[in-house]
Amino acid sequence: MSTIAAVIGRILLALIFIESGITKLLHVAATNQEIVSVGLPSGLAIPVGVFELVAGLCLVFGLATRLASILLAGFIALTILFYHSNFTDPMQATIALMHVAMIGGMLMVFAQSQMWWGWDRMRAERRGEMIARRAELDAREAELRAARAEGAADAARTVPVTTRTVEVERPVEGHTLSGRSLFGRPVLSSARSDTVMTDVNGDGVPEVRRRRWF
C-alpha cells in the first residue's frame, strides 16, 4: 500500500510540470513575454518548457528520479525568487508558500525514490542480484578448490605398502636339507643313512620313508 501511495503522489507532482511544460511549448511567444517582464532574457520559453516536460516524465516513470527531483526543486526556488518574491502581497505570499510545499515534495521524492517502484529501483535490485549471484559462484569455486586440495593432500599422505611372503625352509629336527626332488620339493636326510623325508603330496608335512639301495 505504501508503494502505491508513493507512486501516485509522485505522478501527481509530475503532472504540474508536464502541464506547465506543454503550455509553454504551445504558447512560446506569450511565455517569452512573461519571462522578459521579470527581467530574464528572451528565448527561454522552449528550453524551460522542454525541461519541465522531460523532468515531469522522469518522475512519472521513475527514471533518474533523484536527479529530476533535485533539479525541479531548484527550478521551483528560482520561480519563487523571480515571480513570487513580493511577500507583502497576500496572493504572492500564498503562491510562494505553495511553491515551498512543492519543494518539500521534490525533496521527499529525492529521499525516497530508491524505495518505491521505478526504473531506478529495478536497476538497483538487478545490480544486487548480480552481486549476490557472483558471490555465490565465487564461494562454490572456492569450495571446489578446497576439496581438490584436500584430496591431493590425502593422496600424498597415503603410500601403498606391498608385502611379500617369503617361505623359509627349515629342516626337521634330526634331519638335514639334502636337496630337492624333481618336483621342487625339499628332501631331508636324517642322521640315519637308511631313511629320507620328502614332502610327497605338497601338504607341508614331510613323509619319512626308507632310502632305496638303488
Image (spheres, rainbow, N blue to C red):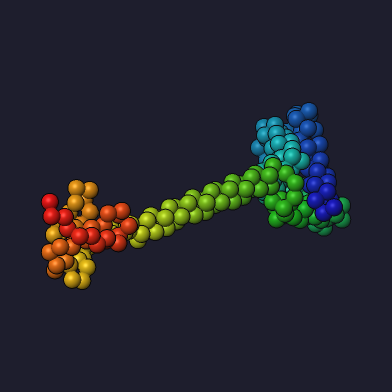
Looking at this rendering, what residue extends furthest in the bottom direction?
Answer: 173
Above or below 201: residue 194: below
Q: Position of residue 134 (x, y in %)?
A: 54, 48
143 to the left or right of 124: left
Residue 95 appearing in the image? no
101 to the left or right of 141: right
Looking at this rendering, what residue extends furthest in the right direction?
Answer: 90
Q: Position of residue 144 (x, y in %)?
A: 48, 51
Q: Nearer the viewer, residue 180 or 32?
A: 180
Q: Tell me which residue sits at (70%, 55%) in the image.
A: 111
Looking at this rendering, what residue extends furthest in the front direction?
Answer: 213
Above or below 57: residue 162: below
Q: Nearer the viewer, residue 115 or 66?
A: 115
Q: Tell me which residue sits at (67%, 34%) in the image.
A: 47
Q: Position of residue 89 (x, y in %)?
A: 84, 55
202 to the left or right of 8: left
Residue 121 appearing in the image? yes
Q: How many marks?
A: 0
Q: Position of residue 167 (x, y in %)?
A: 25, 60
59 to the left or right of 194: right
